[in-house]
Amino acid sequence: MATCVGRIVVQASQRNCAFLMVSAQNKLANRRQLATKKLLTVGRLESPKQQGKYITGQLFLHRIFGYRGILLFPWLARLYDRDVAGNKQASPPLTAETGEHIHTDNKEVKGKTHVYYQVLIDSRDCPFIRAQTEAVTFLGNQDNNRSLYAIPGLDYVAHEDILPYSTTEKNPIQHELFDKFLEQNSGQDPNFVAKDTLKAWQEKNHPWLELSDVHRETTENVRVTVIPFYMGARVSQDSSVYWWRYCIRLENLGEETVQLRERHWRIFSLSGTLETVRGRGVIGQEPILSKEQPAFQYSSHVSLQAPSGHMWGTFRIEKSNGQTFDCRIPPFTLESKQDDQPNPHGFFG
């Protein structure tokens, strides 16, 4: 079996060994030609868990983006799936209901609990994946500092996107935080366990790391998933500004190749303002979603002069025949919470 995701290929042999092929491209050579190809044995594939959770230290391959990673800890999120609510295309199985609801467009969407994981991405794979690898950001901790800082190589991964594997390598993941957060314990499976520094980091930075709500909707086989995060506020005598980041994944579930051309956002603030944002592409790109490379993931930020609001919108998608359609971005709330004044930047000093 071979699954190709971008320039990363995962193969399983009769011995059930997992292989990762990385095709590295020399920037000085012709961009259409691959300069090197290397087939690396990274470990032994394991059966994905249909029930229960993976634990800290589990090595995995990402089912969609193909990168190598390791689990830090799980999050239990509320997944608002408008495809299920509208009896449209079925989504992966979910666990028990939370009993919470969200009302948008006169349609009631039930929230169900779903497991996501905070993970480290292997830095060797970052150049080959179609996901923004600096998706975790935070504010500077000084009142007069409006800068945004980013931690590279952190991601949030749904349970069904985890392909677990095991290895005998002492340092199977290359990431600056690997040795700070994890250590080897050969008597345990998985054989990497959390250090006290990981537990302390999670507890200290819980407010801006926490994944609580996930929103998902599909339009003409293009599925959009949105995860909002509250980042904190900048409060002064004259004004208060509240910040959120949001991670978005677009995934082509169909056979036809499509391309994102434009974005159209509507941003409503509790203060009563309604802002419209239009533009070409996202983060300077107009990604193509094909059967071979079906997904693209990125992060962005929004600020309001009120403690809460809503966002919704559309992506203009172009088909291979030139026809276009508007792909809905599911509505999601922007809610603030009490600031605990974390200083993750200081952790790395």
Image (cartoon, rainbow, N blue to C red):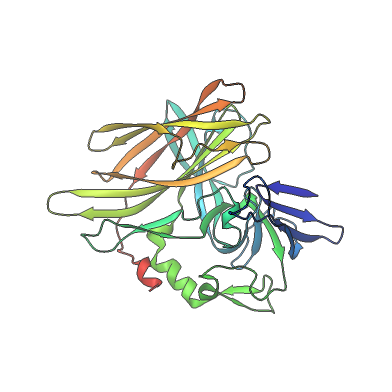
Closer to the camera, 294 or 312? 294
Residue in the picture at 50% in, 75% down: 180
Quadrant hosting residue 205:
bottom left
Residue 138, placed above or below residue 259: below
Residue in the picture at 20% in, 49% down: 240
Closer to the camera, 126 or 69? 126
Q: Position of residue 342 (x, y in %)?
A: 33, 65
Residue farthest toward the right in the current orientation of the protein: 14
Residue 1, placed above or below residue 267: below
Left or right position of 206 against 38: left
Quadrant hosting residue 147:
bottom left
Left or right position of 124 against 142: right
Q: Position of residue 121 (x, y in %)?
A: 57, 60
Q: Quadrant of the C terminus?
A: bottom left
Quadrant hosting residue 127:
bottom right
Residue farthest toward the left in the current orientation of the protein: 237
Closer to the camera, 48 or 223? 223
Left or right position of 101 against 188: left
Q: Position of residue 91 (x, y in %)?
A: 62, 38
Q: Position of residue 71 (x, y in %)?
A: 58, 63
Count of marks placed on residues: 0
Residue in the picture at 57% in, 21% down: 322
